Image (tube, rainbow, N blue to C red):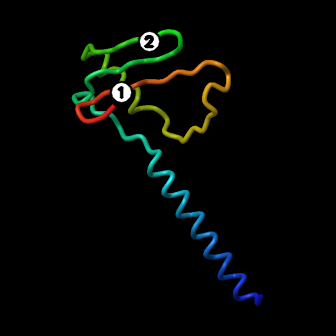
């Protein structure tokens, strides 16, 4: 193969990788929550659950959620045997 073909393949490969990174970044982005649209929050930390429906607590949670440091986190589910999560229900989705 000529050097020109190798360069073209390399450029195409780099562009594909950049496209994949941008696409994955967009689908994993968490938008800010609107406290007015949140109807319920369930905080799960096995074996316990806490259901939040009080408007004041929902506003406090959404405020903390929206102010968090936004960075992608990759983890292995239950790698340590414990996990925590928040199930957020709004008028349109859960």
Nearer to the camera, 34 or 50: 50
Instruction: Name which residue lies at 33% across and 14% down.
Output: 52
Q: Is residue 7 left or right of residue 74?
A: right
Image quadrant where residue 73 sits: top right
Whichever of labels 2 and 1 marks the residue nearer the N terminus, that label is 2
Instruction: Name which residue lies at 66% across and 78% down.
Output: 9
Q: Is residue 41 left or right of residue 82?
A: left
Circle 1 SS class: strand
Distance Cα–Cα, label 2 vs label 1:
13 Å
Q: Residues within 10 Å of mark 1 (few under 14, many from 20)?
A: some
51, above or below 92, in the image: above
Instruction: Name which residue lies at 25% across and 23% down.
Output: 39
Instruction: Name which residue lies at 54% across and 60% down.
Output: 20
Q: Is residue 90 left or right of residue 25?
A: left
5, above or below 64, in the image: below
Residue 35: horizontal and vertical position, in percent?
27, 28
Residue 67: horizontal and vertical position, in percent?
41, 32
Which residue reaches farthest top? 48
Nearer to the camera, 56 or 17: 17
Residue 75: horizontal and vertical position, in percent?
62, 34
Residue 41: horizontal and vertical position, in percent?
35, 21
For the C terminus, the quadrant is top left
Give the residue number, with chain letter if any, for mark 1: 88
62, above or below 28, in the image: above
Q: Residues within 10 Å of mark 2 (few under 14, many from 20)?
A: few
9, above or below 77, in the image: below
Numbered tag placed on residue 49 in the rendering: 2
For the N terminus, the quadrant is bottom right
């Amino acid at each position: 193969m000529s050097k020109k073909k190798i360069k073209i393949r390399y450029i195409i490969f780099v562009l594909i990788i950049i496209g994949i990174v941008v696409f994955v970044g967009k689908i994993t982005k968490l938008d800010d929550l609107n406290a007015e649209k949140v109807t319920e929050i369930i905080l799960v930390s096995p074996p316990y659950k806490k259901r939040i429906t009080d408007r004041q607590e929902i506003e406090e949670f959404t405020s903390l959620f929206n102010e968090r440091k936004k960075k992608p986190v990759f983890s292995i589910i239950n790698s340590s045997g414990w996990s925590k999560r928040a199930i957020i229900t709004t008028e349109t989705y859960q």
